[in-house]
Amino acid sequence: MTVAHGAPVRWAGLLDGLIDAVCLVEPQRQEIVAANAACASLFGLPAAGLLGRRFTEFATTPADLAVWEEAAEAGDAWAPGDSRDHDSWLVDCDGRTRPVAVRVTRLPAGAGDGLWLVALHDRGAEAELRQQLESRVAELQATMESTADGLLVIDLGGRLLHFNRRFAALWRLPADLLEQRDDEAVRAWLARSVSDPSGWASMHQRWDAAAMIETRDLVQLHAGTLLEIVSRPLLSRGAPIGRVLACRDLTEHQRSRAEIERLSHTDALTGLANRRHFAERMQHRLGNPLDGSGAAALLLVNLDRFRAVNESLGPEAADRALAEAARRLRRAVDDGDVMARLAGDEFAIGLREADARRAEACARRLLDALAPSFELDGRPFTLTCSIGIALAPTDGRDLESLLRHADAAVRRAKEAGRATYRFYQPRRNVELRDRLELDHAMRQGLPGGHFRVDVQPQFDLADGTLAGVEALARWRDPVLGEIGPARFIPVAEDSGFIVELGQWVLDRAVRHAAMWWRQGLRVPMSVNVSALQFRHPDFVDRVAGTLDAAGLPAAGLELELTESILVGEACEALARLKELDALGVRLALDDFGTGYSSLAVLKRFPISRLKIDRSFVASLPGADSDSAIVQAIVAMARALRMNVVAEGVETEAQRQYLQDIGCHVMQGYLKARPLSLDEFERRWAGGEWRTAAQAAVPRVARTGNGLKVPDRHAERAPVAAVLPLRPRRPVGRPRAQS
Ligand code: C2E
Ligand code: MG
Ligand code: MG
């Protein structure tokens, strides 16, 4: 403490004990008579330099001047002990100004010796701090506003301290609420906006109960927005003073998650469930396998010869066909049942609590769904499917075994000619043999002479005369015994052996037909042709060559084709059919009705005969839909000038019914089973059946080889009554039968 000469030294100890800058001033001249070290450093002078200087040299604001004016008067208004406070600016000796708070106190009489005590508080640091604080707040505010989250800061009592614009936007706070900043009204608005008020309340309760916890909640707003609210305690010196709520809009996120979830469950092409999802749902449906509660049916649907569609139409068009097939199949399945695309052209359907009847009904609906012809880029075509059915728990209690068994059933449906369904049946003995073994045995069997051709006669329904014969392949394996075509033909088709086998049958059948033709038995020989065989590039030439070699007029041959040849490469098929037609060969569509070709489509092809599949004939006559179908087929075929053959006629009632509705020809056990060539010849020679030409000319004569033929036929060939004879290609001279 530096004290001016003569100044009261007793103040010295007191002033030096103070942190703040303090000095004693003589009020008349405002002369500083004593100052402590803090004061000296504030003024920027050594303490001694201050003494004798006027205080108003350093602080010259109007407030300062006013205070000292009043002090100089020292009237009654300023009682001893009283202070006057004001803010001022101090100019230190280096000319720097700084804000100060000044308190001038009139010292009590007797103690003050007429001096005034001036305490100065440097507010420079404070101002700097405030400025820093303000810029922090500005930064903070900018941060709050620039975040994508809606932020709300509340204190422990729930008072709203701050929220950003994003918060207001997420919660759709109305403008008037924003202006009023009425906490109560905003809180009420928030509570009203959530769709689960009790969840909202419990969230607040959790915060109240534990101020330090962090919470994360999903809150759905009435407006449709889904908010994730993360709340963290707001701390001051480690103690909670409130809470910061960050609200994030998850609506889009949730939507895309749902989309990802959906995509991971569905097949992109068809929109059906995928294999994984199907497995999950089926596992759920099959229930507890041990308590047997999971009665269900699994239908495995495989599109027939879809590979051919794929190859001929190209992958893009095939995809469209596949999607259309999937749409149709889905419509045939109840909403509550699961349907999935397992792979390529394979679909699966899981029926809950289904028995065989329900499964069968569903299978029929699926077949029907594909029945109307498909069209791609203006090209109509037919798609059919084969369906295998496995029942739980009989055929398996878990998905894997059901799928395996349904798959075996699909194969049986394919073997049965496709476009149908089969239930799973534990395999029979012969089926135990691997298909490869069967194929191998067939390839040995053909050169080994184990194959033969049987023929089954066909009869005119109007007059009962013999109208044709169908050649049917037969195979007796020395080890396996007699194996039916329904078993070996699909294997041969799959392996490609059918091309060789089919040619062998054609060759043999045509040679016999040529021999009979020469002997006067002039009815067409029908030969079955597989799609693979038909598509062989040399097929037409082979047919022509076979006819040539045997010396059979083309009109003596009928090719029975299946609808599958019209699928896919319809243009190519049409070209080939036209070549065969030009050759004079008659073309028939076999097993009509099972493949669902529409008659309108068939009109484009040079097909002159339809063979109604025997599955339709079996239930005739009757009031059910099969009768209606058969009747419609016959009527439409007649309208299109096609000849109609009914297959599998076993009863007189069926024959009568077919005759009544105008069907042309019948084939079936009622009149004749398939017979060996010898047996057929023997019975024909025995006069059991007569052709239309023979019926017209009842007189008969014996031929050299013992066959009984009408004598006129030995010379000329009046076959026009039976079929139009249209040899368009020179055929070889009749040769003697070898
Ligand atoms: P598909 O061409 O429809 O032949 C008619 C089938 O019906 C023959 O069966 C015949 O025996 C049978 N059938 C005829 N009448 C009756 C009847 O009244 N009742 C019953 N229940 N069945 C009757 P099959 O001989 O077993 O031949 C089955 C199929 O195998 C044929 O059906 C045909 O698609 C195929 N197939 C036979 N031979 C050949 C061949 O050489 N080449 C080709 N590609 N397929 C052949
Ligand atoms: Mg046939
Ligand atoms: Mg048939």
Image: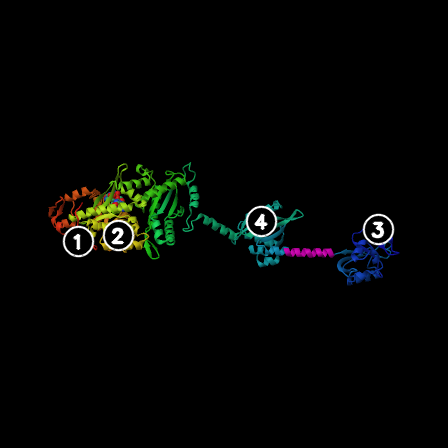
Give the farthest residue toward the right: 6
Give the image quarter of residue 401: top left
Residue at mark 1 = 720
Compute the Cα span from label 2 to label 3. Answer: 133 Å
Tell whether 458 sits left or right of 315.
left
- Observer-side mark, 2 or 4, equals 2
- Observer-side mark, 4 or 3, equals 3
Q: Mark 4 vs mark 1: which is more N-terminal?
A: 4
Compute the Cα span from label 3 to label 1. Answer: 151 Å
| Label pair 2/1, CB-CB below 8 angstroms | no
Q: Which of 307 and 690 lies nearest the eye of the viewer?
A: 307
Magenta-colored stretch includes residue 136: yes
Residue at mark 3 = 13
Looking at the rendered structure, the kind of residue marked 1 is Ala
Looking at the rendered structure, the kind of residue marked 2 is Val
Specify how the rendered protein is coloured: rainbow
At label 1, counting other C-alpha atoms closer than 10 Å, the crowd grade (few under 14, some 14-19, many 20 or more) is few
Give the image quarter of residue 120: bottom right
What span is in magenta? 124-139
Q: Which of 470 and 269 lies nearest the eye of the viewer?
A: 470
Q: Main secondary structure of the magenta part?
A: helix
Residue at mark 2 = 540
Q: Can you give x and y, in whole percent of width and height, for residue 603 in the image?
A: 27, 55
Looking at the rendered structure, the kind of residue marked 4 is Val
Looking at the rendered structure, the kind of residue marked 3 is Gly
Q: Mark 2 vs mark 4: which is more N-terminal?
A: 4
**Element type at marker 1?**
helix
